[in-house]
Amino acid sequence: MLLLECPYCGVKADETELTPGGEAHLKRFGPGSTDEAFEEYLFLRPNPKGVHFERWRHAHGCGKWFLAARDTATLEVFGTYTAQTTEPPEHIIDAIRAKRPDWSQA
Amino acid sequence: MRRYSAFAIAREAARHHQGWERAWKSPAPKKSYDAIIVGAGGHGLATAYYLGRNHGIRNVAVIEKGWLGGGNTGRNTTIIRSNYLQDPSAAIFEKARSLYETLSQDLNYNIMFSPRGVMMLAQTEHELRGWQRTAHANKLQGIETEFIGPKKVKELCPIINLDGPRYPVLGALWQARGGTARHDAVAWGYARACSDMGMDIIQQTEVTGVRRDGGKVIGVETTKGFIGCTKLGIVVAGHSGVLAEMAGFRLPIESVALQALVSEPIKPCMDVVVMANTVHGYMSQSDKGEMVIGGGADGYNNYTQRGSFHHVEETVRALVETFPIISRLKMLRWWGGIVDMTGDRSPILSTTPVENCFINCGWGTGGFKAIPGSGWAMAELMAKGHSPLAEEFSLTRFREGRFIDESVAAGVAH
């Protein structure tokens, strides 16, 4: 069972308390953008076997969206952080690098 | 290949079963092939089989990183049905179901196809109307299904509890020609037939790269070295995204875990397959007597072939209400598989941005039932460049907004 710490209320919540929300840091494209960009934003996902940044909602807690870095091949959690950012913060990147020296950010 | 028959059993019995030959060969890879299929699951082997049988392409290798049929082919709940709402899905699943009917004879391998009937329960007003609509659609598609009332449901499945307090059974969509088959035997039967046609099934060999030359595929890098090919078919389910990345394109796919379990074996008590989509559980009884139970997929990306305990708990809790008889059964085995989910919950059978590279993926939670039809269409696509069954399932449908939206049609993943 996954345990993620909600960065807002500090609760270590297990996954029954949370709702998964898919890949994080998507760059949004809307009307007026090219078909390629729109398709990319709506559908195409790297779906990595390894480090994955993703959205979660503390649905049965504070109700807020937050972000997590997790390994999809081992279920290891590298850390969670607030959603008010367009890219993973430095301390999360460092935590991943410490455990996955070969990892490079796509 | 020596044929299997009653006579063969007698002959081998007379010589102490010393004469059985191996069902398929395990050759070392050749330098190059006309076609390489990555993934020796049901879909990959079926693709190879129909490439040989329907299109005469027999210089084929099927490359598998583990052992054949060891992925989702060996991890599903073996249900076969074709009662889909949308025409393209109905066409390919019905093709598969009809091929299953004679597959044992075609392959000379008993796949134990058991057309015991599949019922999909309507447990809310919404579902009731949905299944009635599907029954009408199936009539127009020429697929034999009917909407049946609660009385008939009870007749067909006496252990069901019709008036559960939360989810009463209001009726069901009944497909009498649906059923189950022995999942491993489907992979083994295709493998034996492929090997007999001279194809190479190369197990324990992982594809580590896709070699291209000017936008055209020329072969694959593997743990046993480079193997050249004219055409490449990627048929790897959960790991489709990983292979696509090697080939240099991206897919509208996310991989999640789907779990199933079986109970301890009990005496025969249920001779149909029951699916309850509202509570998200389905159940049938295997020939060994185990109750085979499946549920919903986990919601987050996962490659670990195991899932969350609470999902299993939800599934079983709901089924116990509909089938009180199972409440004291012990769980015997529990496992997970990695399923490849697309945005519209329909598969992708398509050409790709890389020339001569084809992909068959996105079957999500419902691939087993499609194996023969999927292989049939994929083989045609690889041999001719187009296939009427595969046409609507192209990779470009997402960009063009031509979804085949079975997730809305079924109300759940299917």
Image (cartoon, coloured by chain):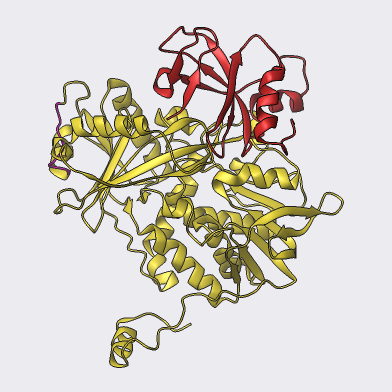
- Depth check, front residue: B386 or B235: B235
Up/down of B269 relative to B182, above or below: above
* Outermost residue toward the front in this view: A98
Picture quarter containing residue B324? top left
Q: Is residue B318 left or right of residue A105?
A: left
* Residue B239, x across and y down, in percent: 59, 46
Quadrant for the C terminus of chain B in the image: top left
Residue found 15% across the figure and 39% down from its top: B328
* Residue B83, x across and y down, in percent: 38, 42
* Residue B407, x across and y down, in percent: 46, 30
* Outermost residue toward the right in this view: B214
* Residue B54, x across and y down, in percent: 58, 67
Up/down of A55 relative to B78, above or below: above
Residue found 47% across the figure and 47% down from its top: B367
Query: How many numbered discs?
Result: 0
Per the picture, the main secondary structure of the magenta-coloured stretch is loop
**Shown colour of chain B:** yellow
Residue found 20% across the figure and 51% down from its top: B271
Can the viewer see residue B76? yes
Picture quarter containing residue B136? top left
- Depth check, front residue: B284 or B376: B284
Can the viewer see residue A88? no
Question: What's drawn in magenta, residue-wise?
Answer: B157-163
**Shown colour of chain A:** red
- Depth check, front residue: B332 or B247: B332
Instruction: Inspect the magenta stretch and tell me whether residue B159 lies in it.
Output: yes
Instruction: Inspect the magenta stretch and tell me whether residue A25 lies in it.
Output: no
